[in-house]
Image (cartoon, rainbow, N blue to C red):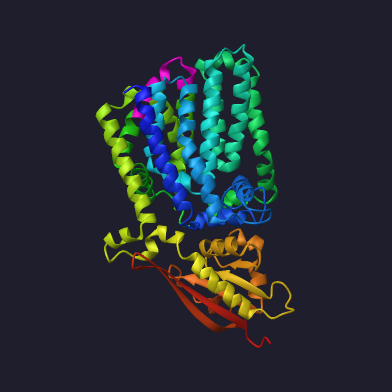
Amino acid sequence: MTARQLLPPAIVASLIMLGVRLHSAGDIGFGDSEALYAAYALHPQIAYLDHPGLIGRFASFIAESAHHAPTPLAAHTATALLATLFPWLLGAAARASGADGRGAMCAVLAALCAPELAIGLFAMTPDLLLAFAWTTTLALAAAGLRGSPKKVASGASLLVAGMLAGVAASAKVSGLLLLAALAATYASRPAREHAKTIWPWAGLVAGALVFAPIALFEARSGWPMLRHRLVDAPDPGFSLRNAGALVGGQLLYLTPVYAVAAFFVARDLVRARKGDDPVERLLLAAFVVPLALLVPLALWSHVAEPHWLAPPMLALLLHFARRTDAVGRLLARISLGTAAACVALVYAWVLVPQVTRLAPKSLDARTDISNELYGWPIAMRAVQRLALGSHVPGEEPGELVVVGPHWVVCAQLDASLEGEIPVGCATPVRDDFDDWYPRSRWQAADTVIFVSDARFDLDPTTLLPDHAIAREERVTTMRGGRIARVFTIRVMSRRGAS
């Protein structure tokens, strides 16, 4: 099919996805990780334990006013638009990389159907910002390498590409690997003419300067992000369990057929390594260099997540646009159809409550992460009602505190309360809440509202031995006639407090 023939189905698919996402924005709340990033807007920092601070600035930008967290509706409306735009950005990057119109449209369709992109980029996460910065960096670097080293436009493209790689690192630390991939490209034989100019190296310096404040903050703070990811992570070490999670995650996030197609594209990209095309060398470096670190890290870390490998895969989509014959037509069509069906199934599972009735009765609601998206507004109304009833006029701030057993609960509380009531957290390991509201402070409060759900079997009296439970309520939320979440809210008063 020609580019003109592929354009209408791509536009229709984009409009359908946009409609579904905008509809979703009005129906669902924050996922637990999204709630944490929304809470970042209430606690501005250069970096946090999990990620650099760019996602916090993004959350602040889309909030209705300064010093507030965005609502789920505002956040998901913004991400719906960005997630729908991303495949077309990828198509533009493909054209900048030298793909013809048909190849670019094939890349657009591939991105539209890939579950990891079609579903994952709808969430308000650092990965959304990373995807845009990473793809734009590759587009500009490719355009610069394709142009004459003597032209200003080529030099400017390479300069801005390096700067945007620094922006990618400000979204997620793995963006530093993109800077390394650019350096490896410029040092290679195909890019030697451009490497003789100042522009590619000035771009790398610009990217390093963009990330420098984050690095300085980390150094002054004792490298908390690095320690959190590598030192404090539970059960470190290479294991079959980690290998299974890595491989199984790719099959789940891409679908097995799509993963097979990606393998053929990767094989074709590696085979092109001996050529003199600087763009091929760029895409190879953007694929291999990040994987060289991310794969061993995922095999070693118990808390590694499959989507860590997603950014290097973007190079495969651009290579596919340039070499669509790397995948047979039948395999390409089956891959797209299978992936699109999986995307439709996931959105149906999340948005249509009746679909959950098709699941086995043995399915534990605690393991269904889509339940995170529902129920919190109901639970928060109960929390606020109990907080109002527990407040004594004239109390000093901090005398009443809301506490959760884990950051996934605390983040939902903090994002919803927006600083009206301090939120403490009892995550078994140190988290950002230990800086925002230390344990010593909430343990000393006269009244603590302890909020948990069925995922956490924790007796709050072990955390607060000086407090007694004065009141307890349970809030049960339903989806499709089945229990989704059971929240337990306890009002705990200090023994002997008036």
Q: Nearer the viewer, residue 227 or 181?
A: 181
Is residue 277 one of those drawn in magenta? yes
Q: Nearer the viewer, residue 70 or 468?
A: 70
The spot of residue 329 in percent (x, y) is 27, 27
Residue at (32% x, 29% y) in the render: 264
The spot of residue 206 in percent (x, y) is 66, 30
340 left or right, relative to 207: left
> In this view of the protein, can residue 296 be seen by the observer?
no
The spot of residue 450 in percent (x, y) is 55, 74
Q: Is residue 385 above or below residue 183?
A: below
Q: Is residue 353 above or below residue 335?
A: below
The spot of residue 175 in percent (x, y) is 55, 38
Magenta segment main secondary structure: helix
Please state the extent of the stretch shown in magenta in the rendering: 265-280
Q: How many marks?
A: 0
Q: Quadrant of residue 197?
A: top right
Quadrant of image for the C terminus: bottom right
Residue at (50% x, 16% y) in the render: 190
Q: Quadrant of residue 176?
A: top right
332 left or right, relative to 317: left
Q: Is residue 228 above or below residue 158?
A: below
> In this view of the protein, can residue 397 be seen by the observer?
yes
Residue at (35% x, 60% y) in the render: 353
Residue at (41% x, 17% y) in the render: 274
Is residue 378 one of those drawn in magenta? no
